[in-house]
Image (cartoon, rainbow, N blue to C red):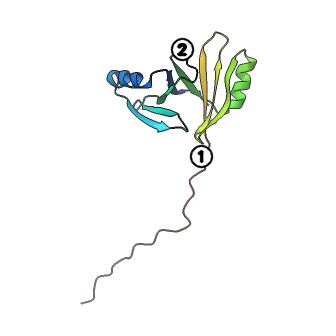
Amino acid sequence: MPNPFVHVELATGDIPAAKKFYRSLFDWKLKDTRMGPGMTYTMLDAGKGGVGGGMMKKAVPDAPTQWLSYVAVEDVAKTVAKARKLGATVIVESQEVMGMGTLAIFVDPGGAMLGLWQPAKRAPARKSAVKPAKKAVRKPARK
């Protein structure tokens, strides 16, 4: 599986200012989503061909304001173990996100932070057991 960048996320201390700035700068659509008590996540739609993402309040007030990129992987747990073996420091172990998938975050040996994303497995669409009714064919009336 190729491992594309699939999500970007801004952690900031001032969400209203960030939303105002990025709405003015880019043609992004922003939508607030409640993520539990006291937490709002702003979804970012960059449009066709763009990587989507979001904005959230920094979890640690003294942490720097920064963007974090996420890379798609088939198995977050295996990728975290491999990254750790290669010298990465894991910041967030595998963590499920509201049934949408699993994430993890690490710092590589050079000091760069990166997120991993494994989308949730979706059940295959079930075919309906009800067959569509056949269309009635109208015969011409007898004269």
Q: Which residue is mark 2?
A: 64
Q: Quadrant of the N terminus?
A: top right
Q: Residue furthest left?
A: 143
Q: Earlier in the sequence, mark 1 or mark 2?
A: 2
* Residue type marked 1: Arg
- The stretch of residues the image draws in magenta is 122-128
Does 38 lie within the magenta span?
A: no
Query: Mark 2: which amino acid?
Result: Pro
Q: Which residue is mark 1?
A: 122
Q: Is residue 124 magenta?
A: yes
Q: Are marks 1 and 2 in contact (CB under 8 Å)?
A: no
- Residue situated furthest right in the rendering: 85
**CA neighbours of label 1 inside 10 A, class few (<14), some (14 to 19), many (20+):** few
Residue sitting at 60 percent across and 13 percent down? 112
Q: Main secondary structure of the magenta part?
A: loop
Residue visible at 57% across and 57% down in the picture: 126
Q: For residue 140, say whether it is visible.
A: yes
